[in-house]
Amino acid sequence: MFGPVATVRIDAQQTVVVHATGAFGTNTGGANSLKLDLCYRVGATGPVSRFNGGQAFLDGLSVGGFTRLPFSLSTAEELPPETYQIGMCGVAVNANWNHNDWIRLTVQVFR
């Protein structure tokens, strides 16, 4: 995970709703093959898992040269009772993703 993470306690029969937007880009001739998702882990050290089995991800993102754009993801899922860290995660296969700025994260828990 990268950017801010939210630590939340989820009790039985609660749903977590997550929205994240991040600005990603390049200060070179272009960048491609960026994959973004929303992830969680139990506590601060557990393995990272993707929400909804990874069905909400953005894949194959690209930008032209000297460009930075916002990319957004949202999801909702009922997770087992536990304390979680939640945030945006991803993989940049192309090293040209070097002009990244901010990530805004909202996490809400509903019964």
Image (tube, helix red, strand yellow):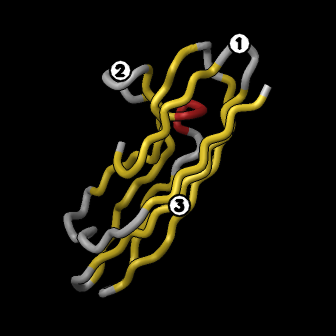
First in sequence: mark 1 vs mark 2: 1
* Residue for point 40% across, 71% down: 62
The answer for how far apart the CA atoms under marks 1 and 3 are is 28 Å
The answer for how far apart the CA atoms under marks 1 and 2 are is 20 Å
The kind of secondary structure element at disc 3 is strand
Q: Label 3 near label 1: C-beta < 8 Å?
A: no
Q: Circle 2 is placed at which residue position?
A: 46
Q: Residues within 10 Å of mark 1 (few under 14, many from 20)?
A: few
Left or right of residue 107, residue 27 in this image: left
Left or right of residue 45, residue 77 in this image: right
The answer for how far apart the CA atoms under marks 3 and 2 are is 24 Å
In the image, what residue type sits under mark 3? Answer: Thr
First in sequence: mark 1 vs mark 3: 1
* Residue for point 61% across, 42% down: 107
**Residue 43: % across, % down:** 41, 21
Left or right of residue 5, residue 16 in this image: right
Depicted 42 relative to depicted 4: above or below: above
**Residue 4: % across, % down:** 41, 48
Q: Circle 1 is placed at which residue position?
A: 12
In the image, what residue type sits under mark 1? Answer: Ala
In the image, what residue type sits under mark 2? Answer: Gly
Q: Residues within 10 Å of mark 2 (few under 14, many from 20)?
A: few
Q: In which quarter of the image is the C terminus?
A: top right
Residue 26, by quadrant, is: bottom left
**Residue 30: % across, % down:** 29, 80
* Residue for point 37% across, 84% down: 67
Q: Circle 3 is placed at which residue position?
A: 21
